[in-house]
């Protein structure tokens, strides 16, 4: 089983259980989207000593946690699970890392991104419109496919450009993703 040196930031106990089935890693749980100051300080300490990987659910709460932790730890790595690969088997569950397959978790943890807030914009708004990723009836579906292929987590039209820039997605990677989808 692959050993992960960094500590993986997850939302809860079920995420930890699932990750430990896939890889040999330590996790820290935020216990929901109201991340405590104590938890943030612990994550910051771990970031300095071992590094951290943020691996939250592909939903509103998960993205909220990702933003909070990213602000506190700008050098954190990011792992994403696609929405369609984190669907619960029961009708009453919500999207989550705990529902992803072992293979999906391993794949997500082998495709990490680090934010680069200084990166230049390589993909323009015009590029996004030409690719029909914004301002189009089918844009949401196209964005879901693009984000899943690039493994950058799903974002809405307003956030797509920012996410592509933050994770340094090149024009070549973008075009390849469009061709494959």
Image (cartoon, rainbow, N blue to C red):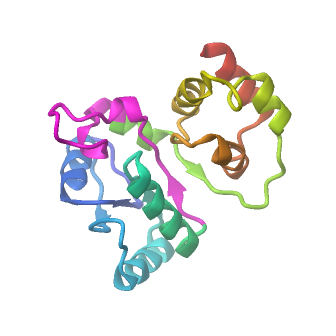
Magenta segment includes 89: yes
Taking the image as shown, residue 76 lies to the left or right of residue 116, namely left
How far across and how far down the image is residue 86, in percent?
32, 36
The chief SS type of the magenta part is: loop
Magenta segment includes 13: no
Q: What residue do we see at 42% from left, 78% from top?
A: 40
Which residue range is magenta in the image? 75-104
Q: Is residue 9 above or below residue 106?
A: below
How far across and how far down the image is residue 66, in percent?
48, 60
In which quadrant of the rendered view does residue 136 lie?
A: top right
Q: Is residue 133 above or below residue 117?
A: above
Q: What residue do we see at 47% from left, 55% from top?
A: 63
In which quadrant of the rendered view does residue 5 lie?
A: bottom left
Taking the image as shown, residue 152 lies to the left or right of residue 10, namely right
Q: What residue do we see at 71% from left, 23% from top?
A: 132
Q: Which quadrant would the C terminus be assigned to in this image?
A: top right
């Amino acid at each position: 089983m692959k050993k992960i040196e960094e500590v993986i930031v997850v939302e809860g106990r079920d995420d930890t259980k699932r990750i430990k089935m896939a890889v040999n890693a330590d996790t820290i749980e935020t216990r929901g989207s109201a991340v405590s100051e104590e938890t943030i300080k612990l994550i910051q300490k771990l970031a300095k000593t071992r590094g951290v990987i943020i691996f939250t659910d592909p939903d509103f709460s998960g993205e909220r946690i990702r933003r909070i932790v990213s602000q506190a730890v700008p050098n954190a790595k990011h792992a994403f699970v696609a929405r369609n690969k984190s669907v619960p088997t029961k009708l009453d569950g919500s999207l989550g890392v705990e529902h992803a397959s072992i293979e999906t978790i391993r794949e997500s943890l082998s495709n990490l991104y680090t934010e680069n807030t200084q990166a230049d914009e390589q993909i323009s708004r015009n590029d996004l419109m030409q690719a029909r990723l914004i301002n189009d009836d089918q844009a949401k579906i196209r964005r879901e496919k693009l984000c899943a292929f690039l493994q950058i987590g799903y974002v809405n039209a307003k956030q797509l450009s920012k996410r592509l820039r933050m994770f340094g997605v090149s024009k070549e990677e973008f075009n390849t993703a469009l061709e494959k989808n």
